[in-house]
Amino acid sequence: MAGNSFGTLFKLTTFGESHGKAIGGIIDGCPAGIELDFDFIQNELNRRKPGQSKIVTQRKEPDTVEFLSGIFENKTTGTPIAFVIYNTDQKSKDYSHIKDVYRPSHADYTYDQKYGIRDYRGGGRSSARETASRVVAGAVAKIVLKDIKITAYTSAVGNIQLEEDYNLYDFNQIEHNDVRCASPEKAAEMINLIKAVRKQGDTIGGVITCVIKNVPVGLGEPVFDKLHAQLGKAMLSINAVKGFEYGSGFEGTKLKGSEHNDLFNADGSTKTNRSGGVQGGISNGMDIYFKVAFKPVATLIQNQEALDNKGNLVEMQGKGRHDPCVVPRAVPIVEAMAALVLADFILLRRQESKEW
């Protein structure tokens, strides 16, 4: 299986399956001499881990990260940083009923057709549990990025959504509600909706908005490695993601050029920021902001028609512990992937200018 690595200079390779002994990763290319805050890294993992509230999966995993190499006296040595997160609360028997059945809208069918073998226990490698490794690497990347501030929050669940302008909200509110919404009032509505959907044995999707501040001018490599293109790739690699838009996004198509253009100030900043902090694929120093759309979780605790490996249409019902909405736990994953992209471009710029 190819495609297990992400990044060019700051590179992450992940390994492991949802119901295997452990998951983990190797970070290659992290500069030497970076002092790591292990409490911060663990806290980032805690934001993603299962069982943290009543509106997420009740799988109980401590998700404690153990670093194996690349660190001496709390500082990076410049060598590969290996880490592992042990799985402790697998209930593989919950998946025995789908051993020979392909769940609708899952990777079951495509994995079996491509590789001729599939780990049906929680989806194996296709499980979103793999993203815990991304969060560890993203936390290290955030430390490398220093003053660049990456903040994501839930901006929609179903039809309940926040206003587009992120400046209207207090980001300090995000971690004070179970859905990680920047508006306490909307958060309460979202939580009630998720609970109602869960009670029906169903699931629901949502949107995460991400804002990146203090980005220097000049990150991004035209033509094929544009900054927004790499951010899009990063977000679309996350499980359940169905869409990515930055800046004015699809709404910008409704404007005329005279309405959409970001006019300059004398210092090079712009009066508006419909470009989303990226012009010509290169950061322009303004805030980068984008939205990521997540589909409803495919596993339903209700009867659905499915296909078995003999070509028969059968009826099945999902079992086990699943998120009724992935968005609350996906917030730190979005931040982590954004951090990996920016760390890569920061190191590339240093390499080009020989600023080490």
Image: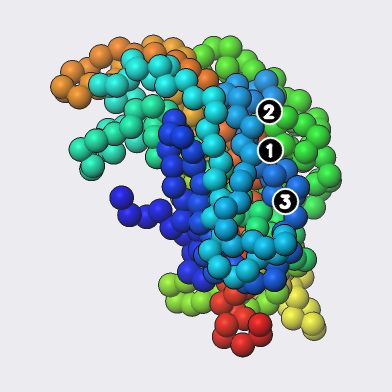
At a point 64% along the width and 51% down the height, the residue shown is 335
Residue 337 location, quadrant: bottom right
**Contact (CB < 8 A) between labels 1 and 2?**
yes
Instruction: Mark 1 or mark 3: name the one nearer the start of the chain.
Output: 3
On the image, numbered disc 2 is attached to which residue?
Answer: 52
- Camera-near label (3 vs 2) is 3
Horizontal side of residue 78 vs 271, given as left or right: left
Instruction: Mark 1 or mark 2: name the one nearer the start of the chain.
Output: 1
On the image, numbered disc 3 is attached to which residue?
Answer: 38
Front-lying residue, 22 or 160: 22
At a point 56% along the width and 41% down the height, the residue shown is 85
| Residue 46: mark in rendering | 1
Q: Residues within 10 Å of mark 2 (few under 14, many from 20)?
A: some
Horizontal side of residue 293 vs 35, given as left or right: left
Q: How many marks?
A: 3
**In the image, residue 276 above or below residue 91:** below
> Is residue 22 shown to the viewer in this render?
yes
Amino acid type, mark 3: Phe
Amino acid type, mark 1: Asn
At a point 27% along the width and 38% down the height, the residue shown is 110
Instruction: Mark 3 or mark 2: name the one nearer the start of the chain.
Output: 3
